[in-house]
Image: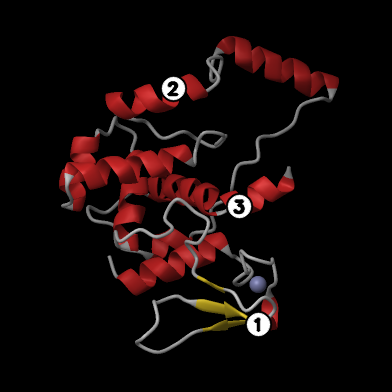
Amino acid sequence: MDEAACREALERLRWPEGPVCPHCGAAGYVISKVGGKSHRPGLYLCSECRGQFTATVGTPLEGSKLPLGKWIHTAHLLNSHKLVSVREVESALGVTYKTAWHTVQKLLRGVQDYRGPLPKFGKTVQDYIEPRLPKTRNTLTYWKCQQARKRAGTYKAPRVPVASGTLSLLRFTPPATQAHVERTERFLIWILRDPERSNEH
Ligand SMILES: [Zn+2]
C-alpha cells in the first residue's frame, strides 16, 4: 500500500474536520503543514503553541518505525472474520515475530473499551484481551437486559465510530469485502481518536 495514501487516510480518520493540535487543541488556520525533505512526512506545526505533531502523536502508532501501511494491514487482519494469530500477522507483513507481536499488542490495548463489532483474535492474543471484555456480551441475558433498559428509557447506545468510506480508497491485497474494510475503519477510528476520548471523561 502506498505510504502517502495511508498517511492521508489515517489523517482523515483521526481528524475528519482537519488537523487538530494534540498539544493545545488548536485547529484551523493556526495549523500549517511543514514541508521539505529534511522533515518527517506528515508533520504539522501549530502556531498557537509552537508545537509540532503528526497524525500518530498520542496514538499506539506514535514513534513506530513500521510503515503506516503495515499498521493498517495489521488492523485489517485483526478484523477478519476468522481467528488470526500473531504468526499469520508476521508472515502477511513480512516482519519479525517480535514486531508482529508488538504491533498487535499495541492495537489491542487501544480496543479495551471498544464497543463496536469486535475483531476475532488468535489464541495468544485472545488470552490478553478476553479478561477485559464483559462476559455477558452478545448473550441472550445481555440482550434481554438491553431490551429492558430500552423500555425503561435508560438505554445508552454504544458509542461506535461511523465508517465514512475513507479506507475503501486504499487497495487491500487480497481484495477485501466492503464490510471487512468498514470494520477495519471503525476499529482504526477508535484507536486514533483515543486522546480525544479521554478528554471526554
Ligand atoms: Zn498547539
Q: CB under 8 Å between callouts 3 and 2?
A: no
Report if the beta carbon of the residue with label 1 is closer than 8 angstroms to ligand 1.
yes
Q: Residue furthest bottom?
A: 36
Residue at x 37% of width, y 31% of height: 120
Q: Is mark 3 within 8 Å of ligand 1?
A: no
Amino acid type, residue under disc 3 in the picture = Pro
Q: Which mark is residue 195?
A: 3
- Single out the residue that lies furthest toward the right: 152
Q: How far across and how far down the image is residue 4, in percent?
A: 36, 74
- Mark 1: which amino acid? Ser
Q: Nearer the viewer, mark 3 or mark 2?
A: 3
On residue 47, the disc is: 1
159 up-or-down from 22: above or below:
above
Specify the quadrant that holds the N terminus.
bottom left
Q: Residue at x 29, y 26 (%)?
A: 124
Left or right position of 17 against 163: right
Q: Give the SS element for disc 2.
A: helix
Query: Residue 133 or 22: which is nearer the viewer?
Result: 22
The residue where tag 2 is placed is 130
